Amino acid sequence: MVAVNNNEQKYKSPGFLLSTGGFLAGNLAAGLAVNIPNRTINMAIAKKLVKLNENLSKDELTLLSDGVKTLLDKSGLAAKGVSFIEYTRDSAKQVADLLRINAPKILPYRLKELLIRGPLNMLEVGKNAFFAPKGNKIVIPTGGKFSLAYFHEIGHAMNANFSTVGKILQKMRPLTMLVLPIALLSLLKTKKAEGEQPQGIWDKTTTFIKNHAGKLTFAAFLPVLVEEGLASIKGQKLAKSILSPELLAKVSKNNKLAYLTYLGLALASALGVALAVKIKDKIAHRKPIEDKATVKA
């Protein structure tokens, strides 16, 4: 296809084969850029988190369990209606319902059901805990597992109940869903030729998204990264008032390791999308036509 810019310069778009090949190559690169770190670095971090929690003594588990319950009253969260739910067979349906009502409303039912399986599976094996803003519940695995994370979840509850900024950030978490449309639009959009200017609002908007795809992808994760950081800071500050320095250090290490998984995903996604766009553009891009003769589309 041939297009004409305002300066009468004509530009030729790449053919179907080049465009398709560029899209597939870029998509493959993005998948590798995200999956390789996730299967190596994040898996290593996850193993350290599990080991850190599994190596707690019975006395430490008791102190942590009693401590978080004390903090519900001390922090004022109990007065706000915040409480714990221990995940068991009897509470499984209640927990699943909490995950459903906290999932973005825009998602279709089947996708919601697919998304809640991950957290539920992690709870079943004692490797997850979470705070549900809608319902004001902190869900924890049975038997005191993953207890170093409880203070972080209290921090999420503090954000939801005592912080306007924290509450806004929690509501902005679904922005991470923009990563897929950003990536798809950037890969489907053909790169402009050197010197070619976008025409019209849609062309200018999509060109901007394409040219800043990596940065926009990382920006989509910023509400999550900031809110997660605030939750750890607030939870740890409360923990400091009741835990020994040794146990507090373990809570701090747990929070830092967990945060690295969020940061790693954000960075890998941003770099993956940026790399995908670069590869696609290298293979398929628009070119100026030097010959001024009329060329039919």
Image: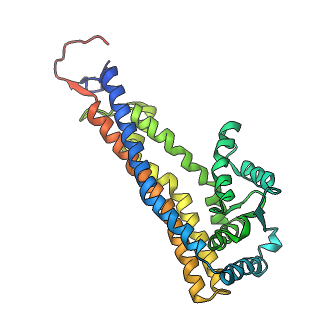
Question: Residue at left 60%, top 50%?
Answer: 174
- Say if residue 215 shows up in the picture: no
Closest to the observer, 5 or 27:
27
Question: Residue at left 56%, top 59%?
Answer: 224
Q: Is residue 139 above or below residue 20?
A: below
- Say if residue 98 shows up in the picture: yes
Q: Is residue 275 above or below residue 265?
A: above
Image quadrant where residue 170 sits: bottom right
Q: Pinpoint residue 115: horizontal percent, then vertical percent.
A: 64, 46
Closest to the observer, 62 or 165:
62
Q: Is residue 41 left or right of residue 153?
A: left
Q: Is residue 178 left or right of residue 39?
A: right
Closest to the observer, 65 or 180:
65
Q: Is residue 153 left or right of residue 280?
A: right
In the picture, which quadrant includes the C terminus? Answer: top left
Q: Pinpoint residue 28: horizontal percent, then vertical percent.
A: 38, 38
Q: Pinpoint residue 80: horizontal percent, then vertical percent.
A: 80, 70
In the picture, which quadrant includes the N terminus? Answer: top left
Image quadrant where residue 192 sits: top left
Q: In the current view of this chain or complex, which residue is farthest to the bottom?
A: 244
Closest to the observer, 290 or 23:
23
Q: Is residue 291 above or below residue 32?
A: above
Q: Pinpoint residue 65: horizontal percent, then vertical percent.
A: 72, 77
